[in-house]
């Protein structure tokens, strides 16, 4: 739907209700040129997510971080750092084995496994170098 800004001013409340449907977009024009659009918040989130994916890359399925490794032959690891595909597979196997052991312990104790929350991403700390390392050591 296209409306002039003047027309939209008189029925803004109705337009806000109308664009709550994610499929509905209202384009506002000035002198027959589009200058703005009214969209639902859900549609805005979708558009921002698409823009972020285009700029930073897709989200890693485990860490949730965007942007992967730019190095050829490397993939993002569990914590988002670049690793070889073999290291990524080993990290995944370690997570799966840990979850299996957790489920076995809970089953032995007569408890049902808790959905979600099994995976905790370990933070990887970088070692300080240079003057920062000396300052850290002298503390």
Image (cartoon, rainbow, N blue to C red):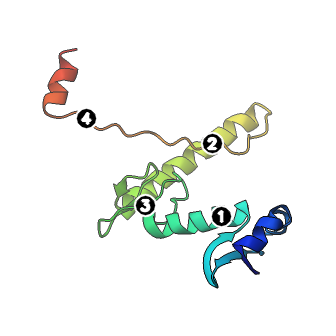
* Image point (18%, 28%), residue name: 133
- Distance from disc 2 to disc 1, alpha carbons, whole Å, reads 32 Å
Q: In screen coordinates, is 123 left or right of 129? A: right
Q: Quadrant of residue 69?
A: bottom left
Q: In screen coordinates, is 20 left or right of 46? A: right
The local secondary structure at tag 1 comes to: helix
The local secondary structure at tag 4 comes to: loop
- Distance from disc 3 to disc 4, alpha carbons, whole Å, reads 23 Å
Q: Which mark is residue 118?
A: 2
Residue 35 visible, this angle: yes
The local secondary structure at tag 3 comes to: loop
* Image point (54%, 54%), residue name: 62
- Looking at the image, tell me whether mark 2 or mark 1 is earlier in sequence order: 1
* Image point (79%, 39%), residue name: 112
Judge whether 85 appears above or below 130 on screen.
below
Measuring from the top left, give residue 95's x and y in whole percent: 53, 48
Which residue matches tag 4?
Answer: 127
Indicate which label's residue lies in the foreground, 3 or 4: 3
Which residue matches tag 1?
Answer: 44
Q: Quadrant of residue 48?
A: bottom right
- Looking at the image, tell me whether mark 3 or mark 4 is earlier in sequence order: 3
Task: Look at the numbered discs 3 and 1 and tell me whether their residues touch, using CB distance below 8 Å.
Answer: no
């Amino acid at each position: 739907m296209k409306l002039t800004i003047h027309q939209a001013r008189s029925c803004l409340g109705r337009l806000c209700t109308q664009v709550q449907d994610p499929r509905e977009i209202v384009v506002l024009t000035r002198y027959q040129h589009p200058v703005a659009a009214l969209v639902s918040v859900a549609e805005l989130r979708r558009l921002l997510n698409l823009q972020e994916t285009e700029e930073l890359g897709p989200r890693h399925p485990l860490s949730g971080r965007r942007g992967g490794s730019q190095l050829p032959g490397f993939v993002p690891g569990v914590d988002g750092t670049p690793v070889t595909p073999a290291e990524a597979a080993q990290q995944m196997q370690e997570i799966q084995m840990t979850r299996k052991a957790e489920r076995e312990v809970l089953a032995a104790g007569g408890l049902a496994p808790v959905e979600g929350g099994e995976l905790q991403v370990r933070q990887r700390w970088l070692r300080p170098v240079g003057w920062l390392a000396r300052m850290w050591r002298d503390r």
